[in-house]
Image: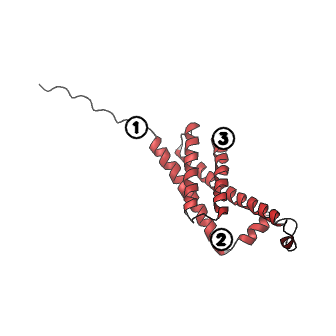
Amino acid sequence: MLLWFGASAVAAIAIAWVAAMIHASGHAPVGLVSLGVGIAIGASVAAIAAKQNVRSTRQLLVGTIFIAILTVLAEHAWLYVDFRRQWLESRSNAQVALFRTESPPSPSEYFSQELTPQSATLWTVDALVIVASATTTAYLIRSNSKPEPKSPSPEPSAPSS
C-alpha cells in the first residue's frame, strides 16, 4: 500500500511538472489541461494500483483523491519555481533590477499577491476538475479491469421420458 502511494506521488509530481510547463507556456485552454491532468493521474494511479495488487476500490478512490490534491499543490509549486527563475533572470537587466528586491517574494507572499477572487475561482474549478476526472478515470479503469464474476451455468436438464 505504501509503495503504491509513493509511486503514485512520484507520478503526480511528474504530471504536475508537465501541467505547469503547459500553463507557463501560455497555451493552456481553460479546463482542457485540467481534464487531461486528471485523466493522466487517474490512469497512472489505477495502473500502479493494479501492479501493486491494491484490491479495495475504496482505497483506490480515496488514494486517488489524495494524489489528485497532491498534483494540484505540486503544479502550483512548479509554477512558483518557474516564477522564481524568471524573477532571477530579470534581475540581470539593470532597468528591472532598480525596481526589484534582490530576492523574489516568498511562497506565501507570492500566493497572497496572486490570490484574487477571479484566480481563486479558477484555481478551485481547476482543482475540482482534476480531482473529479482522476477519480472517475481510476474508477472506470478499475471497474473495466475487474474480472466479471462467472454466473453459474445452468445444470443440464435430465432427459424427459
Q: Nearer the viewer, residue 95 or 23?
A: 95
Query: Which kind of residue does numbered mark 1 sit on?
Result: Pro
Label 3 vs label 1: CA separation? 29 Å
Query: Which kind of residue does numbered mark 2 sit on?
Result: Ser
Q: Give left or right: position of 155 versus 127.
A: left
Q: Residue at x 65, y 62 (%)?
A: 25
- Please say which color scheme the image uses: secondary structure
**Residue where numbered disc 3 is placed:** 2
Label 2 vs label 1: CA separation? 48 Å
Location of residue 53 with respect to 88 vertically, above or below: above
* Residue 59 shows up from this direction: no
Q: Nearer the viewer, residue 144 or 84?
A: 84
Extreme-left residue of the structure: 161
Q: Secondary structure at mark 2?
A: helix
**Residue where numbered disc 2 is placed:** 119
Query: Which kind of residue does numbered mark 3 sit on?
Result: Leu
Q: Which percent across, then down, holds residue 130?
A: 58, 58
Q: Which percent across, then down, holds residue 102?
A: 88, 66
Chain-order first, disc 3 or disc 1: 3
Q: Give left or right: position of 38 versus 96.
A: left
- Which disc, if any, is residue 149? 1
Q: Nearer the viewer, residue 24 or 159?
A: 24
Location of residue 135 with respect to 156 vertically, above or below: below
